[in-house]
Image (cartoon, helix red, strand yellow):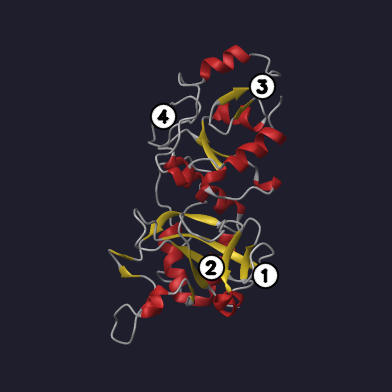
Amino acid sequence: MGKGIFLHRSDSIYDDRPSERYQFPSNYLTRVSASIGDWIIYLEPSKVRGTRGYFAVAKVADVVADPTSKGMYLALIEKNSYLDFVNPVPFNGPLGIVESGVLNSAGKISGRAQSAVRPLADADFNRIIDLGLVDESDFLPRVDDDAGPVFREERVPFEFEVERSRIANLGSRLFRDRMFRRRVVDAYDARCAVTGLKLINGGGRAEVEAAHIRPVEKGGPDIVTNGIALSGTVHWMFDRGLIGLNDDLEIIVSRQANDPEGIRGMINRSGFAQLPLRTLDRPHPAFLAWHRENCFKH
């Protein structure tokens, strides 16, 4: 096993779904196979306009031949392992190059940086994770007073223990919920997608909540396109199928709601969900369809 970097771009010619699978040609088979059972980090190339840099982490469950495309393979992502970074990490930002493995002996960027799949040293993995998932903001509601930042290296004597702590937290439901919440609330600028209200409490924290469109216990991933920012009451109604969204993001109200007019009075004047500015952050039609078919009360 070994950690790795997988290059991905939203306009890729490959049939990638980062939270589910990564498609690649046979020349990368050995490198990708080396990551089976271990964690990889997704990187969006610098050439992509508005690049996110290192933007997510996931665990590779298996590698199989792509049954739909001759000569291509699929790295299958372990269920519920994918996690968007709260803070996308630039390939070459204020801290310089964070992936030391792409540097040559002279400290310059080498040709290894052009490889779509490449190994990643544990130290580089830890550094990118620290930068991508640290959350020191008080902008979000607290889940637990003890659920603060966990990625710290100062005064920690054993690197093995630090590594084990990071990996453990990548699988922690409490930690993943906090990271998901932060990512979704940021994407929606702390504004409820249904009411349009942006409420900040006296302590400076956003009152809006992050709802999974397809719940984790039903196979939904912790990915921003499976999330939507909702106020508390709206979140309750969404989870119970009293409201839903069409593929065009029109807000629909269940016929089974006991006060449909009252619910409609809460919906913003447009009748459509207010969305993140970034197209890549908007709800995916597949998750919306799942919610309509499995949660919404017709």
Mark nearer the N terminus (3 vs 1): 1
Residue 61 shows up from this direction: yes
Q: Secondary structure at mark 4?
A: loop
Mark nearer the N terminus (3 vs 4): 4
Q: Nearer the viewer, residue 141 or 293?
A: 293
Amino acid type of the residue tagged 4 in the rendering: Lys
The spot of residue 142 in percent (x, y) is 49, 43
The reply to whether dot 1 and dot 4 touch (C-beta < 8 Å) is no
The residue drawn where x is 44% and y is 26% is: 196
The residue under label 1 is: 65
Amino acid type of the residue tagged 1 in the rendering: Ala
The reply to whether dot 3 and dot 4 touch (C-beta < 8 Å) is no
The residue under label 4 is: 198
Q: Secondary structure at mark 2?
A: strand
Q: Nearer the viewer, residue 89 or 278?
A: 278
Residue 158 shows up from this direction: no
The residue under label 2 is: 40
How far apart are the alpha carbons under marks 1 and 4?
47 Å
Q: For residue 113, what is the image quadrant?
A: bottom left
| Quadrant containing the C terminus in the rendered view | top right
The spot of residue 249 in percent (x, y) is 53, 31
Q: Estimate how packed mark 3 is, as few (under 14), some (14 to 19) or many (20 or more) residues with alpha carbons within 10 Å.
A: some
Mark nearer the N terminus (2 vs 3): 2
The residue under label 3 is: 254
The spot of residue 48 in percent (x, y) is 37, 58
Amino acid type of the residue tagged 3 in the rendering: Ser
Disc 3 or disc 1, which is closer to the eye?
1
